[in-house]
Amino acid sequence: MLLAELSEANTRLASFALIDALTDLPNRRAITDTLACALGKAQRDGTRVLVGLVDMDGFKSINDTHGHQVGDLFLQEIGRRLRGGLRTMDAVGRLGGDEFGIVVPCPACDGEAAAQSLQARITAATTGDYQLKEVSFAYAGASVGVVVIDPLQIADAEEAFRLADAQMYRIKRLRRNQLIAPVPSPVM
């Protein structure tokens, strides 16, 4: 009986170590591990992986205006919307703060077109009206950077996320300048 209780406790601890407590999504460690596995599989299969980074523009303003409880509810809703905008074989996790990472296997796709499509879908999923308890507001959407990773050239998950981060910052600069036209995603 003690062994069963210890086993159950270990299972709960392992889950806590890989799940973001606020959003119930995989945390940074878990999504990075998922990306590493996806890159390994893509390398063996000769395919690619789409890697996305999502940054919630204006999140500090939401927290400052409506309070941290509403900010937390907003992040939870973003997590639900992101998960709803992906296939079951795709992965999304919270990297920390107001950033989310996305991993999408791309077995037989036109990399750039698939990256632009994913970027548009994720941006649309984050855009719109939010009703969080008694607070409602319209949100213009997140800055989303998506890159196509060829694992024969880049096999490191952290490097893949850095490239997606750089693409996200390019998008963020364009959004600040009111140039919201899609930006081609580089193939890495």
Image: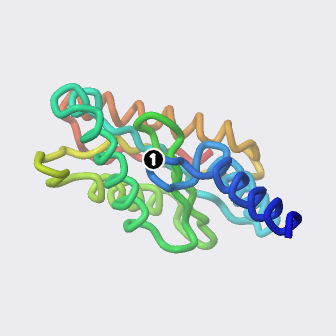
Residue 43 visible, this orientation: yes
- Name which residue lies at 17% across and 51% down: 133
Residue 147 visible, this orientation: no
Q: Which residue is mark 1?
A: 22
- Name which residue lies at 51% across and 55% down: 25
Residue 163 as seen in the image, left or right of residue 136: right
Closer to the camera, 94 or 39? 94
- Name which residue lies at 65% across and 60% down: 48
Q: Amino acid at mark 1?
A: Leu
Measured as percent of width and height from the top left, residue 40 is found at 78, 58
Closer to the camera, 12 or 114? 12
- The answer to which quarter of the image holds residue 140 is top left
Closer to the camera, 71 or 2? 2
- Name which residue lies at 23% across and 41% down: 180
Q: Quadrant of the N terminus?
A: bottom right
Query: According to the image, what is the colour scheme of the structure?
Result: rainbow
Q: Residues within 10 Å of mark 1 (few under 14, many from 20)?
A: few
Measured as percent of width and height from the top left, residue 24 is found at 49, 55
Q: Relative to 87, say whether 30 is above or below.
A: above
Measured as percent of width and height from the top left, residue 174 is found at 28, 32
